Amino acid sequence: KAGVTQTPRYLIKTRGQQVTLSCSPISGHRSVSWYQQTPGQGLQFLFEYFSETQRNKGNFPGRFSGRQFSNSRSEMNVSTLELGDSALYLCASSLAGIESLQYNEQFFGPGTRLTVL
Amino acid sequence: AQSVTQLGSHVSVSEGALVLLRCNYSSSVPPYLFWYVQYPNQGLQLLLKYTSAATLVKGINGFEAEFKKSETSFHLTKPSAHMSDAAEYFCAVTLFMDTGRRALTFGSGTRLQVQP
């Protein structure tokens, strides 16, 4: 069974640009969550999608957005990039989402490392 | 305020020694608790989780954790460290956000070094 895949693995952008990251969940998983990992702030929850609907959103500015498609694949977009957006962006998928983590497991992808110059 | 705290950003042990990584949480309702491990250039892998069943939880690779409600702790232990255990470990807790929904909140992480 294939794991969670994220593309691209590495990305370099300049300030002011926008970027789109992609996540393909494990087959059959309907929930996709995104996290930002930085040395200073650690791992922070960005948002969760379930069956194409945003179920929850973390405390990030509106420049961060996402969506989920009918095949459960998800994308996140960051507009008007800032230096502080440099981070490892992790995607995780699960069968039923964070509200049901007592019954299922969230599987993480390897991440996309975004560098903003 | 709801939070999760990992004491010690770096822990160094000798191979064969006991591993103890500390995690304390603050939550207004009983949370679900998790330990994840992250190897360099990889995502997170679940080691174990507590979901209100047995308070002593056994996970993969010989790790276990004990939920102590009175101490609001969920410390991770392994009796005998192996070189392959060197990695970063994250404690995570499901906490309710202002949205009224749970989110997975992570501690700041503990980097475990294993000395030969």
Image (tube, coloured by chain):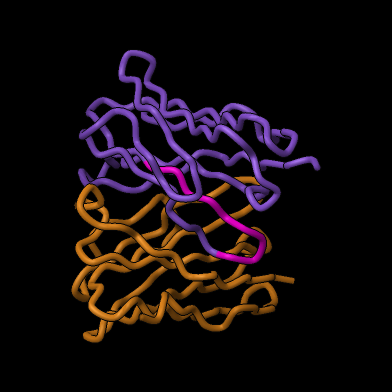
Chain colours: A orange, B purple
x and y percent of residue A4 in the render? 42, 75
Q: Residue at x 64, y 39 (%)?
A: B81
Split into 4 quadrants, where in the image is the N terminus of chain B? top left
Residue at 53% across, 66% down: A89
Percent coordinates x, y for residue B25 in the rendering: 40, 27
Total marks placed: 0
Task: Decide if residue B95 is in sight here.
Answer: no
Taking the image as shown, residue B106 lies to the left or right of residue A71, namely right
Q: In this picture, which residue range is highlighted in magenta?
A: B34-42
> Is A67 above or below relative to B16?
below
The one of B21 and A43 positioned closer to us in this rendering: B21
* Left or right for A49, reference B115: left
Nearest to the observer: residue A17 or residue B112 = B112
Asked whether residue B111 appears in the rendered view, the answer is yes
Q: Is residue B40 magenta?
A: yes
Vertical side of A95 occupied by B77: above or below: above
The percent coordinates of residue A84 (x first, y second) are 64, 58
Q: Quadrant of the C terminus of chain B?
A: top right
Q: Position of residue A23 (x, y in %)?
A: 42, 78
